[in-house]
Image: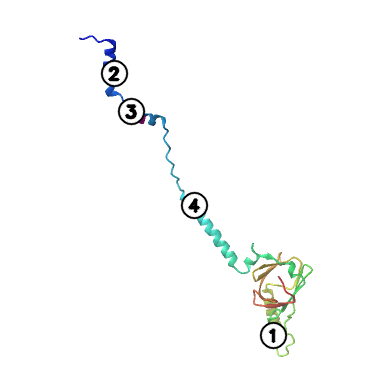
């Protein structure tokens, strides 16, 4: 065996190590892999369709209910979109102009009091000499039955409101004997009630 000096031995060991050393390009790649942090992949958003569906159905329901309330005559006049015009009706007198066999209304809004009077006392059968007493009594009973079915009853009502929505007006009287009566303004001083009765007023109302 040929003896090696220290320098020769180091040179031979270096020659043996060269095949196992990484190339400069591989060293750079390894260094980047170790010291360069990987960017996290963006997480995919998971859409939960059930809550979205429930919210959509609720929205459709609210829109539908609002549309029905706005489009329904009478009830909608007293709703959120109605304007309180009670004060502007002070000193207003409404007098029925259409003929009706049951009532002939005379209505006064004065001093925060609603006065309703029926001036028709049954002229169609009162004083008629061509009918018997029994017929008069029967006609009087029928007259009273029809009166009882009318929305507005004669009397004084100190607590009332008048609300307006477009050309519709609703008179509301709360309480056990209260009522709600809707009119449509058909001319500057003419109104038609929900029962078809027409009225004229003494002044221009809001």
Disc 2 and disc 4: Cα gap in Å? 70 Å
**Residue 21, percent from left and from top:** 30, 24
Tag 3 or tag 4, which sits nearer the N-term?
3
Q: Is residue 83 magenta?
A: no
For the magenta stretch, what is the residue range? 25-29
Q: Which mark is residue 14?
A: 2
The front one of 165 and 181 is: 165
Taking the image as shown, residue 202 lies to the left or right of residue 24, namely: right
Image quadrant occupied by the N terminus? top left
For discs 2 and 4, the disc positioned in front in the rendered view: 2
Image quadrant occupied by the C terminus? bottom right
Q: Residue 176's quadrant in the figure? A: bottom right
What is the image's colouring? rainbow
| Residue hosting label 1 | 135
111 above or below 22? Answer: below
| Residue hosting label 4 | 52
Taking the image as shown, residue 162 lies to the left or right of residue 18, namely: right
């Amino acid at each position: 065996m040929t003896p090696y000096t220290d320098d020769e031995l180091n040179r031979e060991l270096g020659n043996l190590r060269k095949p196992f050393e990484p190339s400069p390009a591989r060293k750079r790649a390894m260094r980047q892999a170790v010291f360069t942090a990987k960017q996290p992949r963006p997480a995919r958003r998971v859409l939960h369709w059930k809550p979205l569906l429930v919210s959509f159905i609720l929205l459709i329901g609210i829109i539908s209910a609002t549309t029905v309330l706005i489009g329904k005559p009478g009830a909608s006049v007293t709703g959120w979109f109605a304007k309180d015009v009670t004060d502007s009706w002070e000193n207003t007198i409404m007098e029925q102009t259409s003929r009706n066999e049951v009532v002939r209304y005379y209505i006064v809004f004065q001093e925060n009091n609603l006065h309703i009077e029926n001036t028709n006392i049954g002229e169609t059968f009162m004083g008629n000499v061509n009918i018997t007493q029994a017929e008069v009594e029967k006609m009087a009973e029928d007259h009273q039955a029809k009166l009882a079915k009318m929305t507005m009853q004669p009397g004084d009502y100190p607590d009332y409101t008048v609300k307006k929505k477009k050309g519709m007006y609703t008179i509301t009287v709360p309480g056990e004997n209260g009522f709600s009566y809707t009119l449509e303004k058909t001319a500057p001083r003419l109104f038609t009630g929900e029962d078809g009765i027409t009225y004229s007023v003494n002044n221009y109302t809001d």
